[in-house]
Image (cartoon, coloured by chain):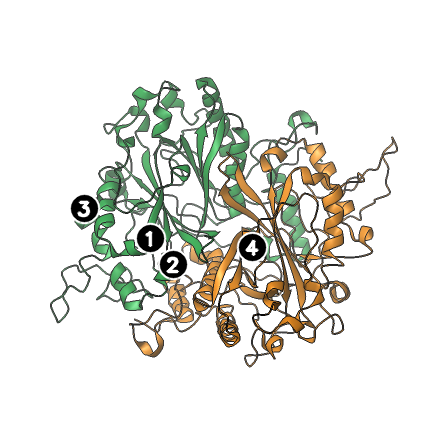
Chain colours: A green, B orange
Amino acid sequence: MTQINRRKLLGIGAAGVAAAGAGAFATRTAMESPAPAAAASTADPVSFYGEHQAGIVTPAQDRLHFVSFDVITKKRDELIEVLQEWTAAAARMTQGKDAGTFGAVGGAEEAPPDDTGEALGLPASGLTITIGFGASLFDDRFGLAAKKPAALAGLPKFPGEDLRPEISGGDICIQACAHDPQVAVHAVRNLARIGFGKVSVRWSQLGFGRTSSTSRAQATARNLMGFKDGTNNLKLEDAAMLRDNLWAAPGDGPAWMAGGSYMVTRKIRMNIETWDRTSLSEQQEIFGRDKGEGAPLGKKKEFDQIDFAAKKPDGTPVIPMDAHIRLAHPTTHGGARLLRRGYNYVDGSDGLGRLDAGLFFISYQRDPHKQFVPIQMELARKDTLNEYIKHISSGLFACPPGLRDAGDHWGRSLFA
Amino acid sequence: MTQINRRKLLGIGAAGVAAAGAGAFATRTAMESPAPAAAASTADPVSFYGEHQAGIVTPAQDRLHFVSFDVITKKRDELIEVLQEWTAAAARMTQGKDAGTFGAVGGAEEAPPDDTGEALGLPASGLTITIGFGASLFDDRFGLAAKKPAALAGLPKFPGEDLRPEISGGDICIQACAHDPQVAVHAVRNLARIGFGKVSVRWSQLGFGRTSSTSRAQATARNLMGFKDGTNNLKLEDAAMLRDNLWAAPGDGPAWMAGGSYMVTRKIRMNIETWDRTSLSEQQEIFGRDKGEGAPLGKKKEFDQIDFAAKKPDGTPVIPMDAHIRLAHPTTHGGARLLRRGYNYVDGSDGLGRLDAGLFFISYQRDPHKQFVPIQMELARKDTLNEYIKHISSGLFACPPGLRDAGDHWGRSLFA
């Protein structure tokens, strides 16, 4: 009964389901049709190895489990050991296998299983596991101070933000994305289990309904304000712009980050009840787009070119001067762009009769201080949207390049 | 630009996607293969009308948004009006339409939209919206005291529970289940919007990975302890048992509940970190099943008959006397059964280095005091699982029968 692994179980499950006539749940994961992007179906695995980490330009999956860890061991070797074990587990889980062998090592049942089991029978579901290192990891505990990238310098205080330290920052983050939330949760939970006693969960966030497509093959999803989000996002097809805006180049900072990217997270609480009492025209002027189609105001289709110069008959701009798409647009920031990869969240209710909901914003960029910071500063100062949102957590992490093969592991070049 | 409705947009979206080569997201909802149960695919609508409310025996969808409201208006007529408006919105949303017309009434853009928009372009996704009335609604505010079912008498205090009042109870609950969390969230959010100023969100819970299948056509999913959950659940194919155990009969209580069912909710926090350090054999003895296949101990397959009398060579029972499946089994409770419809949850982390995760238990039954109460009392007293779980919220709601047609509305017979 032990030593049953996830792949084997999946085989049994699929056969059983076929014989039983195919339940809705099993059918959904097993029989989806191919998509043109990285994963052939939402059930399939995404490659764990490559020049860059998966989970950045990978077409955004539908579900997120994000976790930030504090390192609690003081021993450098123990931290390296955790990173090695995590790498091995991530390599397995992203391919739809267990974190370890499911039963105890050697077949004995007298040890805890090497996998927690809740993803047994589920396919890889496009799982990506992306790691990032926070500024606090580069203090004097592990001898990493000299390796700290300048890009990890603290973000400035933005007007109006109300950050909660207990859900901000952290030494190491893991972004787990998948098409099945149970698979993403399983990944984070097993990494936490492996790191037990050496790392501690600082904060964790679930999300759904990816609000920024990262491939032109994806339809643009909607945020909880009901607007399409990510129309002009950097996308995996934009090779030249990715080189200029997404990936750290060899001369940008420490050698261990070449080919990596910097991740900024912001938990953005929305006052959706107030928003819902705002008129449609005001909502559209705040965003600068129409709500139904997502077209820039004055245009017809979502991807029509934005005309910032267009004027109404009365001489006022068609797209207001403080519209979100104007303030955030690359032309306002010398061409600076982000690859956004955020998710909607609902964390229940807030005890004041309202849903606790919003956007868990994630962006990747070559240099946050030249990209996220000026864009967000402009938004924080001028965006009318600020009446309806509040930034309540913040994170900045250095995500190293991808791993070449199974001989490599997370943090190898950082600790070398 | 206004008056675009969700169905029309969906048509546009689907065409656009086909032309663009089909993104993973759009493909997933549009091209799934048929399942034999109520919904033909996970994108399709489930009928809103019928003898019983949808969302009870409907094959359990993958995602949950559950909300409990306090009624804050003191006016009976305003409450009835909310229930009427909710009924109309629920009838529309479950069929994949907006909560109202999307643009403002009459085409003006100067009013808030009648739908919040985040589900524009998404299909019905099997959405069901199920309403229940809590005991507190039957106090002296609305003249309903004489209509209160005896079955809504308070649940006893169970050993070990640690209930938090702010996430327990409530006047009215809504269970929204769908195959897409954005669709479930959209439904709850729009009902809250419609009820603004008359009802207030008391608590709300998201869930995923339905842990109890409610149809034999569904594969059994796993809870966050990694075990299959719901193997012996009441299922929609069990007509005679549903009659005896699920639906309130005409003589059971007030006439307005005939054909309805009583719902018990329990938020069950799991100490998953402790569980994950427990040996496989101990985990299996606690449940009474093997973890991989889900077979009763001593048997081979999930659905093999449980043999509670079987003994090991040393004379001890194969299935321990305090195993979960023995304590909860109908033979231990004079045949009493529940229809369970719970979901896994992860609410982030708890500030103590642990994931805040567990099971949001939902059960339906004819009489909670003859079904849930004795079963839970036995479990609360004897189940070894209690070392790893804690009940932190509780709810008991009377879910009325289904609506016949669009001339009917929620609460009509209750308020008649």
Query: Is residue A368 toward the left or the right of residue B280 in the image?
Result: left
Which residue was labeled with disc 3? A333
Residue A356 % position (x, y): 44, 53
User: Do the residues indicated by labels 3 and 2 lie within the same chain of the protein?
Assistant: yes
Inspect the image, locate mark 3, and give the three-letter code of the amino acid beneath it: His
* C-alpha span from label 3 to label 2: 29 Å
Instruction: Tell me which chain the residue with mark 2 is part of.
Output: A
Which residue was labeled with disc 2? A272
Inspect the image, locate mark 4, and give the three-letter code of the amino acid beneath it: Asp
Residue at 28 percent of width and 43 percent of height: A239
For the N terminus of chain B, which image quadrant?
Answer: bottom left
Inspect the image, locate mark 1, and give the three-letter code of the amino acid beneath it: Ile
User: For residue B334, which quarter of the picture?
Assistant: bottom right
- Which of discs 1 and 4 lies nearer the camera? The answer is 1
| Viewer can see residue B290 | no
Which residue was labeled with disc 1? A389
Rate crowding at label 1 as few (under 14), some (14 to 19) or many (20 or more) other CA atoms within 10 Å.
Answer: many
Mark 3 or mark 2: name the one nearer the start of the chain: 2
Instruction: Tell me which chain the residue with mark 1 is part of.
Output: A
* C-alpha span from label 4 to label 2: 25 Å
* C-alpha span from label 3 to label 1: 22 Å
Is B71 above or below relative to B167? below
Circles 2 and 1: CB distance less than 8 Å?
no
